[in-house]
Image (tube, helix red, strand yellow):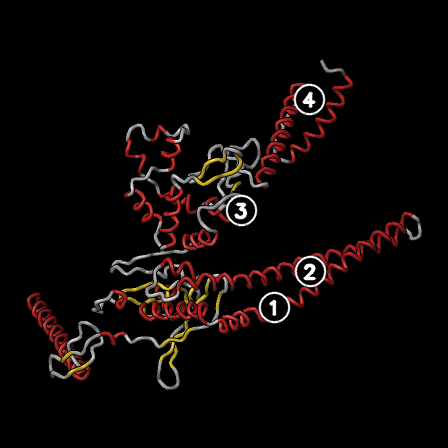
Amino acid sequence: MLKIGEFSVLSQISIHMLRHYDEIGLLIPEHVDDFTGYRYYINEMYSADVSVKIKSAYRARFQQGKFMGTYAPYGYVKDPADHNHLLIDDKVAHVVREIFDLALAGNGIAKIRKHINKQHVLRPAAYAAEQGVTGYERYFEDNEENRYIWSENSVRGILRSPIYAGNLAGYKRIAANMKSKKRPSKLPEEWEVIPDTHEGIVTQEEFDTVQQLMTSRRREQNAGGFKNIFAGVIKCADCGYALRAMNANRRKRPDVIDCVLYSCNNYARYGRSECTPHNIEARDLFNAVLADINRFADMAVNDERAVRAIEKRLTETDQSKAKAMEKEQKKLNKRLAELDRLFSSLYEDKVMERITERNFEMMSGKYQKEQLEIEARLKEVTETLNESYEKSQGIRDFLSLIRNYQGLKELDATVVNALIDKILVSEREKMADGTVRQEIKIYYKFIGFVGELHITPTKRWTALPVKHCTVCGVEYVPGSGISKYCPVCAKKIQRERGIEGKRRSRERKRQVYIELSAKNDRLI
């Protein structure tokens, strides 16, 4: 039994806590005057307090990079010496590696799933059940073959999980409060990630590339069998829309690449009111990109002077800017230290009553305002310096990477996705001498845009052999695969067909008029 004094103190504490918990959303009944009501809410407060403490403990361990799951994810096992640490599971790590390799090669989730299913590999749930994890066997009781049928969600989950790049990901679904059972899912970019907590099956660069490919709208292969290795990479330089690969149906070529051109998707949908075609032949694009990659690869291996020139050109502005910012950073840090001393001295003067309270408030407010401004500027300077250092490191990383592609003969999606962030294609431009020029900008990994490429677009009919006109027999270069007449005869035939069409139209109208007149005569 509680004594009256204890009950009074308990009442005051409870009322104070009730107000607090009312603010955070706990429901309060209309009648809390009796002891039952107090006891109910004391239990609620205790539960909420325990919940907060447990969550805080879990978050602290998560931020230390400790894995808190009951079971290790597919591709990993728990370290026997430390159950909060993950080790690579050599039995299935090659499956995860293959899934990422297929994604890097430009394959979609459905295609990857079909490939894995053909290999008759145990799906993650079946593999977990085989390792002794309970709760999964019910999925395979009726059909044993289900153990080897992967779902698209399983493939997508592996490709989306930062854990395979060596990072710990958590807080993907968070309840609103301790009483709510709803746990809405967060987007992958909203997950909390602790980097470098264990050994990754893939590199961070490979993981980031896969995320970029998955978020781009991609159509890897069209109906004609053309493999669009630039899907998700090639963009319009003016409107930013993707360029889509289009079949030129009237072309008859032995190579499918010569039957395809890229065109702005914005223009294709809405016409010239939104953009212009930005057409570029697939063959021209392939050749230009391949030549540029080989140029950089040869330079990185054989021409150190050219490499240093590129490094200087890309970092010259950043280096001069970085030096000025480093000086500013030292100056700001020095002033912050001075302000700390001034605050200390000012407080001492106040305690010793050398200055009035009014003067102390005025001076401390002034110093505090200056301190906040300096801290904000210092943060901005530090971030800019870090970006400059990252860019310098990025150039070295790019040169190290592209050396591996010296002597490249053919392009594929794996090469494009490993080296290139995006490609911007400008509209064709007619020069003063009558030639046509088109500009391409390639943004490489780590370094971005280096320099534009200028190509002379291939005319569509240059790959077609010479034909003989079926009317006059003269040799001519056809404009399409179905052409039969030379330009002179084509105009003549077109004019004759136009005249014949008009004659037939007049004849049809005359016949209709005759039939109508005969019908009226019969009615009279």
In the rendered structure, which disc, 1 or 3, sits on the residue that comes first in sequence?
3
Instruction: Tell me which residue sits at (55%, 71%) in the image.
Output: 312
Residue 503 visible in the displayed image: yes
Density class for disc 2 (Cα within 10 Å; few <14, some 14-19, many ≥20) is some
User: Looking at the picture, does residue 449 appear above or below residue 355?
Assistant: below
- Whole-angstrom CA distance, mark 1 to mark 4, is 72 Å
CA–CA distance between discs 2 and 4? Answer: 55 Å
- For the residue labelled by badge 2, is the local secondary structure a helix, a strand or a loop? helix
Q: Earlier in the sequence, mark 2 or mark 4?
A: 4
Query: Element at badge 4?
Result: loop
In-image side of 11 versus 432 (left or right): right
The C terminus appears in which quarter of the rendering?
bottom left
> Label 4: how many residues lie within 10 Å, few (<14), some (14-19) or many (20+)?
few
Q: Gap in Å between the C-alphas at discs 3 and 4?
A: 55 Å
Amino acid type of disc 4?
Asp
* Residue corresponding to mark 4: 33
- Residue, x 25% and y 64% (percent of image)? 256
Residue 377 numbered tag: 2
Q: Which residue is mark 1?
A: 319
Q: Quadrant of the N terminus?
A: top right
Q: Amino acid at mark 3?
A: Asp
Question: Could you tell me residue 51's position as x and y percent?
Answer: 60, 31
Q: Amino acid at mark 1?
A: Gln
Q: Residues within 10 Å of mark 3 (few under 14, many from 20)?
A: some
Mark nearer the viewer, 3 or 4: 3
Give the residue drawn at x 64%, y 26%.
Answer: 46
Tag 3 residue: 196
Q: Nearer the viewer, mark 2 or mark 4?
A: 2
Q: Residue at x 48, y 41 (%)?
A: 185
Q: For mark 1, give the secondary structure.
A: helix
Which of the pair 166/510 is nearer the observer? 166
